[in-house]
Amino acid sequence: MENTLCSLKTIQDIRARHGFAFTKSLGQNFLINPQIPRQIAEGAGIDADTGVIEVGPGIGCLTFELAQRAKKVVAVELDRSLLPVLGETLAAFDNVSVVNADVLKLDLGELIEREFAGMRVVVCANLPYYITTPVIMKFLEEGLSVDSLTVMVQREVAERFLAPAGQKEYGAISVAVQYYSAPRLLLRVGRGNFHPAPKVDSAVIRMDILQDRGAKVANEAFFLSVVRAAFGQRRKTLQNALANGLAQIGKQDVVKALTEMGLDADIRGERLSLSEFAALSDLLIQYLH
Ligand code: SAM
């Protein structure tokens, strides 16, 4: 079946017939190049046994490609005015359902259990950019039975997810994403592929969830709070950033742990790799007892 949904002409037709109006605050930039959703769906590794959660189907341009490849697609869309549109554009598929909800408020564990029993599940989406990080962290942190996330995000955000230690884009989100998953770049997408065109370029990344995580830590919540605190005050040395950002941790504790790890006491957080953050948080948590 040919996908005719990713075009300016279709969007204009839908606006005229359904009276649909774009809501800028919902990050509504729709794809108008049919090659992009095809490449996203292919890169997501979807087959006839896969269940797909899509966030923000819009008028269904990516959904169409997902539905052609997957066993089942559940698309979560916040904008109620898109429901009749999706009813029309996806009418040919009996394996798609649309849930009208805010993805950030949804019980995803319950949705997966209800909709995808016995299926391998992946997430695939052209995300609304105003909530990119919270949506991704929700999928990563909730320990859901999801194999991978393949998402279009702002290019700068993709660079942060992929950055290794020491690079200027490296930060708390890089460590967190690389702790939960193995991220890789699939595709760069210029702003001209969307309507309306956003002010930024985009990229598609695929994050394969690591069942054993990217590093072993004694306490996941404490590890993540160490990482957040380390980057909370970027210009500070790690000992100052952690002493300021973590209750119960003093500078001496950090210096002691860094010395034990053979690292310079004046090191900055952006120099530490994921495994060094894991080792540091395991040492610091011992000092708390
Ligand atoms: N998938 C379509 C495409 O690629 O053309 C549209 C992508 S558009 C960047 C983002 C979509 O997310 C919009 O349809 C918007 O209404 C929807 N959206 C925004 N906030 C949302 C939320 N909190 N929960 C679910 N969907 C949301």
Image (spheres, helix red, strand yellow):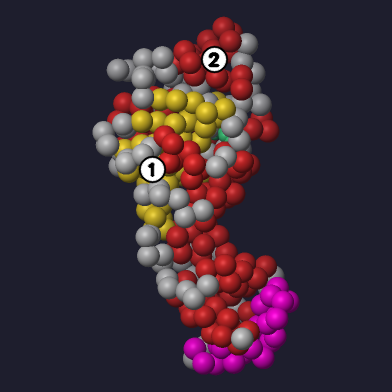
Q: Position of residue 278 (x, y in %)?
A: 49, 75
Q: Is mark 1 within 8 Å of ligand 1?
A: no
Q: Position of residue 68 (x, y in %)?
A: 31, 26
- Above or below residue 250? Residue 125 is above
Kind of residue at disc 1: Val
Residue 109 falls left or right of residue 241 = left
Let me know if residue 240 is in the magenta part.
yes
Front residue of 114/271: it is: 114
Of the numbered discs 1 and 2, the one sitting upstream in the chain is: 2
Label 1–label 2 contact, CB within 8 A: no
- Categorize mark 1 by other alpha carbons within 10 Å: few (<14), some (14-19), many (20+): many
Quarter of the image where ligand 1 sits: top right
Q: Residue at x 48, y 16 (%)?
A: 87
Q: Residue at x 36, y 49 (%)?
A: 147
Q: Disc 2 marks which residue? A: 84
Q: CA distance from mark 1 to mark 2?
A: 26 Å
Q: Disc 1 marks which residue? A: 122
Which residue is farthest left? Answer: 48
Q: Label 1's element?
A: strand
Kind of residue at disc 2: Pro
Q: Residue at x 37, y 42 (%)?
A: 121
Principal secondary structure, stretch drawn in magenta = helix
- Categorize mark 2 by other alpha carbons within 10 Å: few (<14), some (14-19), many (20+): few
- Above or below residue 277? Residue 4 is above
- Above or below residue 145? Residue 255 is below
Write down the region rendered in magenta: 239-261
